[in-house]
Amino acid sequence: MKIFAPYLQSLLEYAEYQDIEYVVLKDVLERPDLDFSNPEEMINAEEYLAVFDKIIEATNNDYCGLNFGCYLNLGALGLVLEISLNTSSIEQGVFILQNFLNNKFPLVSVTVVQDSESYILQLDSSVEDSKLKRHLLDMVLSIIYRELKLMLPQPFTPKIRLPFSKNNPYKDALKAKVIYNTNHQIILPLAIVNTEINRTKIKEIELLLPKFIAMLNDSTKEKNVLSNQIRNMTLNMCSPEIPNFEQVQKQFPYSKRTMQRKLTDEGVSFRGIVNAIKEELSNYLTNEKHLKTKDIAHILGYSESSAYLHAVKAWKDKRN
């Protein structure tokens, strides 16, 4: 079984945020010198699973797969945009997602089940190791959930069913309604599967995605500095809303207090990091896209234009 090589590259990059050195993972790679970022390359699934298993073992975190799926959010935004260019309805979008997994990441499959009220996406995996299987399903479920949430028209949101009694980590990470079931499932109202994709949200992603990627590729930022790692993690997790401190903190091997202390030692705060991201996005949207103030305020997560304008004034005052 072959999978898309860049998915292994993403896994290796995520390991860096967990303080796992590449040399620890290199031993399980069949071709450690291969360019895993090359979109033309495919690798053996066993290679990916071996690296994933090493990371799960090193982090000793029951929600490593869930957290990794949240980290892959920027990639999910790109996939949503790709889907939107090829289809118009939710049902067609799900079909493209199924084909995407079959061709790029066949470790996980999605089956559609319908009843009188719901359109159910059921996730499964052929991986025999129960621990690895759970983390794989958690990862893919978090990605698909956010993709569908972006595609659905307002005010609809998917629901999640999981075979775990402890659902709070999923509720906190995905801001989702989670109920118990024997399988990993995402539930959509049957009545909306043939409706049009949320074009307003897709337009926001189309506007912001190039800037997100440019900010992540900013070579002036030192990758080994924690505040820059937090900045990059925050950018990766945008959907396009910016995640909160608790969501980002769980992606690192530090407690809240330790992370805050380390940031203080660097002379920054999480709020400062987020404000700097918002300011850069604001300048981009204002100078490059010439949007109305209310539209920029909405995209950046401000409930009112006045709150956004207040933030703009604070940024200007700080520079002066």
Image (cartoon, rainbow, N blue to C red):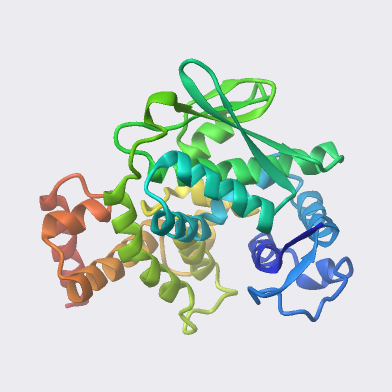
Q: Quadrant of residue 123?
A: top right
Provide residue 206's location: percent of width, then percent of height.
34, 63
Query: In the orientation shown, which residue stands out farthest toward the bottom?
Result: 220
Observer-nearest of 24 and 227 = 24
User: Residue at image x 38%, y 53%?
Assistant: 242
Q: In the displayed structure, would residue 147 be above or below residue 85?
A: above
Q: Quadrant of residue 309?
A: bottom left
Provide residue 48's location: percent of width, then percent of height.
78, 59
Provide residue 37's location: percent of width, then percent of height.
65, 75
Residue 81 in the figure: left or right of residue 107: left
Residue 136 in the figure: left or right of residue 116: right
* Image quarter hosting the N terminus: bottom right
Observer-nearest of 196 and 268 = 196
Observer-nearest of 198 and 130 = 198
Observer-nearest of 249 and 81 = 81
User: Residue at image x 48%, y 69%?
Assistant: 266
Q: In the displayed structure, would residue 69 be above or below residue 194?
A: below
Residue 292 in the figure: left or right of residue 195: left
User: Residue at image x 45%, y 55%?
Assistant: 83
- Residue 257 in view here: no
User: Residue at image x 40%, y 32%?
Assistant: 157
- Residue 63 in view here: yes
